[in-house]
Image (cartoon, rainbow, N blue to C red):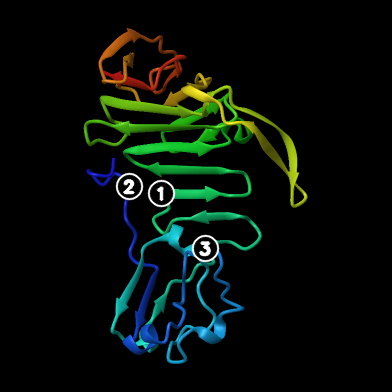
Amino acid sequence: MYRRGYVEQAQPVVYEQRSLADLWQRRMPIIAEDAGYDPNRDRARISSESNIKDGVNPLAFLVGPVVVKYGGEPAKCRVAEFAAYIPEDQRTVLSATGQLSWNYGQGLCTVNAPKAQGATGFLSKAGMVKLADVEIRSGNDYATVLAVAMDDKPLRESRQILVQVGTTERPMGWKTKPATLQGQPAEEVLSFGHAPWMIVDANLTVTLHNSKITSCQTLDANGQPVREIRLSGEAGSKSFQFPTGALYVILRD
């Protein structure tokens, strides 16, 4: 997916120029990933020469690339307009390409590109996750599902699609109990457990809007076929129940 560029990279959304003098004086950048950085508290520490006076929302890192030029002119910084990508009070972030989205209020992240689509997070709470060519309904509280074309074609036209699923993993004997942390629901770990690691079986249904797929097989950890899986649905779409004890499924024409 990454080597073939299935997910588009946006143009830089933040372009900062920092002078060497500002670096030697340890003045703050206009954006930082450190959670301890507060643009309001640290405003006075931003370069007085910068044309950006109030700092940049750290969520900009999710919107697109952040680029820094060292030995540059702070007055020539450029920052995109983020209102459409980081709407206030919605607790969501959308990438500049529109292919990646985060709903940190709901705990859901999706990728929705022509050749790769999927979701990760609290999927059962999210209900049906509908993407351009893939639909996911999960009985797992937390899981990751990703469908990727293996023939460099859009998923709707692909003749070979790999579907990968990951669920919660814990050491055997892992124990927790409900707790409260800073007034919020939490869990207290009672035992870290021991080897081997236990993986929760997948409990989800995947639907692909693709008229060319006719077969579906489980793959082992080495990518070798194990057994056939029943496909259902009409000519324009195919659905299957992801098999328990599996990590990968391949769909072919």
Callout 1, which amino acid?
Gln
Mark drawn on residue 185: none
Label 1 environment density (alpha carbons within 10 Å; few <14, some 14–19, many ≥20) = some
Residue located beneath label 1 in the image = 99
Label 3 environment density (alpha carbons within 10 Å; few <14, some 14–19, many ≥20) = few
Secondary structure type for disc 3: loop
Callout 2, which amino acid?
Val
Residue located beneath label 3 in the image = 84
Image point (49%, 84%), residue name: 46
Label 2 environment density (alpha carbons within 10 Å; few <14, some 14–19, many ≥20) = some
First along the sequence among labels 2 and 1? 2
Residue located beneath label 2 in the image = 7
Give x and y (percent) for residue 94.
49, 55
Secondary structure type for disc 1: loop
Question: Horizontal placement of 200 versus 216: left or right?
Answer: right
Q: Is residue 209 visible?
A: no
Which residue sits furthest bottom?
49
Give x and y (percent) for residue 172.
53, 21
Image point (43%, 27%), residue name: 165
Secondary structure type for disc 2: loop
Give x and y (percent) for residue 24.
37, 85
Callout 3, which amino acid?
Ala
Q: CA distance from mark 2 to mark 1?
A: 7 Å
Q: Is residue 55 visible?
A: yes
Quadrant of the rendering where the N terminus is positioned: top left
